[in-house]
Amino acid sequence: MSFTISNLISGGLITNYYCTSSCKHCLYNCSPFWPKQYIDKETAIKAFKIAKGLGCNTMHIGGGEPFLNKKGLLEVVRAAGDIGIHIEYIETNSSWFTDENRAIDYLLTLKKEGISRILVSISPFHVEYIPLKKVLGVISACQKVGMGIFPWTSEYLNMFLKLDPEKRYTLKDLEDIFGKGFIRDIPKRYWIHPGGRALKYFFDMGMPLKELINSNGCMELFDTSHFHIDLFGNYIPGLCAGIKLKATDLGKAFDKDRYPIINILAENGVKGLYEYACSLGLKMDEKREFGSKCTLCNEIRSFLFKKGLHKRELGPREYYSGLLN
């Protein structure tokens, strides 16, 4: 059987993995320790052309933190306009905010280029690194220029208005303030995908290995309802952070020699990947528990990465380095 991604529905462009924060839920394991690399206009144009050619006319822009390179972000926005891709929103953690006038000037520039909405991140993870004052500053600046706001999430914004806007708060601080169970209930209030740093903090155990390796093929890899293409021209299939395909290979069958990992997962799921890794020396206690098949898959891929295998499919390097350290 050959596997192909021939249609893209909706997705995002990752401009950078470098970020001011190391949020505990981060799917892509972003942090201040990544290289300060940013997508160039040529790569952005190629990504937008590929997306449009496969049926996607609307995308968002995310990171990392896209606003850490305002000139670069503006070039990406203009590239989208040149190709005819509508930017639904740009994500931000608001760390770039210094004063309202500067924010207003830059938002007006983006608005002139067709940007109409900003996704403002508001969560227990972000407030650990970014005081609410910056978030409120971005929201106010958006309102003054007539820019739409996508608060992610408004529930936490309303809750955090009780906090000192000048301070940052750890999860423990928030639990002390809002009561026992605050941390436990976060996944009920805030969507967290089982990948990246979230695997350590929210999906660490619960299902026995023996049960997980009886699963079928992992067809989530081919879900294109929320895809991403990154600054290196990689397509991340099905929100599976740590797996990468050349975006230029979309629309063609994924050759088994070129992409063995995705073919193993598509045909036999995490069971197939586990058996393959065991043949290379992986040893796991069958009684051990994992939070989900994604947790197990990520650990197996980390093992393969550590052995220096499948660099075409496993990466970026910093993603696995962050998990291994």
Image (spheres, helix red, strand yellow):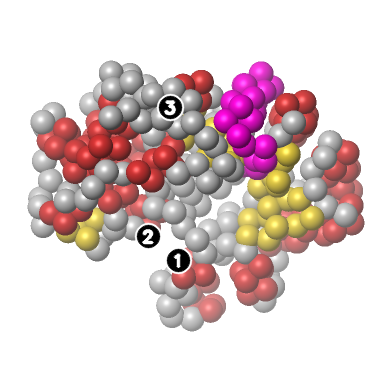
**Of tags 3 and 1, which is closer to the observer?**
3
Residue type indicated by callout 2: Phe
Q: Position of residue 105 (x, y in %)?
A: 88, 43
User: Disc 2 on helix, strand or loop?
Assistant: loop
Q: Mark 3 points at which residue?
A: 245
Q: Mark 1 points at which residue?
A: 187
Q: Does the magenta stretch include residue 54?
A: yes
Residue type indicated by callout 1: Pro
Real-space Cα separation, disc 2 to disc 1, in angstroms: 8 Å
Q: Residue furthest front?
A: 1
Residue type indicated by callout 3: Leu
Compared with residue 214, is residue 35 higher up or lower down, i.e. above or below? above
- In the image, what residue occupies the spot 80% across and 48% down? 116
Q: Mark 2 points at which residue?
A: 202
Q: Quadrant of the C terminus?
A: top left
Mark 1 residue crowding within 10 angstroms, few (<14) / some (14–19) / many (20+): few
Mark 3 residue crowding within 10 angstroms, few (<14) / some (14–19) / many (20+): many
Q: Please tell me which of labels 3 and 1 falls first in the chain.
A: 1
Residue 254 placement: quadrant: top left
Q: Position of residue 49 (x, y in %)?
A: 64, 25
Range shown magenta: 39-66
Real-space Cα separation, disc 3 to disc 1, in angstroms: 29 Å
